[in-house]
Amino acid sequence: MNAAIHQDDDLQAAEADRVTLRARAQELARVPESPVAPDTLLHVLEFALASERYAVEAKFVREVYPLKDLSPLPCAPSFVAGVVNVRGRILPVLDLRRFFDLPGRGITDLHRVILVQGNDLEFGLLADVVTGMVTLPVGKLQTTLPAMPGIQAQFLKGVTADCLIVIDLARVMADPGIVIHEEM
């Protein structure tokens, strides 16, 4: 009878070992969570415009410049606020409020110009206040966008849960309406 008890104990111990080994094998076979790949992160410059928070991809941003000596540009579309001289370069400044049909208010010396470059274009974007750089996970951007007055979804990359509107600057730059070909 003692032999039968030892045999049962041995079977139970072997089964416990199998369960333990199976659990260990499953844990070791589990695919580890990979760190966030750099291409799944979006580095943006956040700014305020018409009481809303906006952002553009940092790869397009050259610098932020204080608004000084904005000169109006005759015969330009309403979204062109004027031109500025930045170290000898004359650059147009676009007012995204007018481009997106957002409510506007007057321009003050407190405004900033975000100098952007891409698609063989270089221009400034008028901003009420520049907040700073932010890194966003691309997967957290809501791409099915709610109706936003004046802003066409084609110009938006997405909106974050905390209502940061990310502008797709590549699409804005590719829009044929942004380039003015008027001869005097």
Image (tube, grey):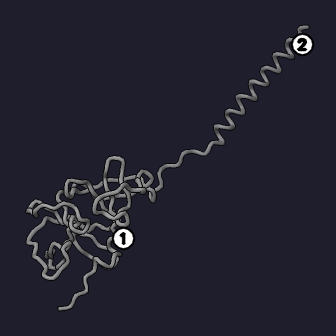
* Distance from the alpha carbon under mark 1 to that under mark 2: 79 Å
Residue at image x 13%, y 79%?
Answer: 73
- Position of residue 118 relative to residue 164, above or below, is below
Q: Nearer the viewer, residue 122 or 162?
A: 162
Q: Earlier in the sequence, mark 1 or mark 2?
A: 2
Are the residues flagged by discs 1 and 2 in contact, CB closer than 8 Å? no
The residue wearing badge 2 is: 4
- Position of residue 86 relative to residue 50, above or below, is below
Q: Label 1 amino acid?
A: Arg
Residue at image x 57%, y 45%?
Answer: 32
Where is residue 12? Give x, y as percent.
79, 20
Looking at the rendered structure, the secondary structure element under dot 1 is helix
- Other residues around mark 2 within 10 Å, as few (<14) / some (14–19) / many (≥20): few
Where is residue 56? Give x, y as percent.
31, 62
Residue at image x 18%, y 57%?
Answer: 129
Q: Label 2 amino acid?
A: Ala
Where is residue 91? Give x, y as percent.
19, 77
- Position of residue 152 relative to residue 179, above or below, is above
Q: Is residue 89 among what the camera can see?
A: no
Q: Nearer the viewer, residue 49 or 23?
A: 49
Q: Which mark is residue 171?
A: 1
Determine which quarter of the picture holds residue 82. Answer: bottom left
- Other residues around mark 1 within 10 Å, as few (<14) / some (14–19) / many (≥20): some
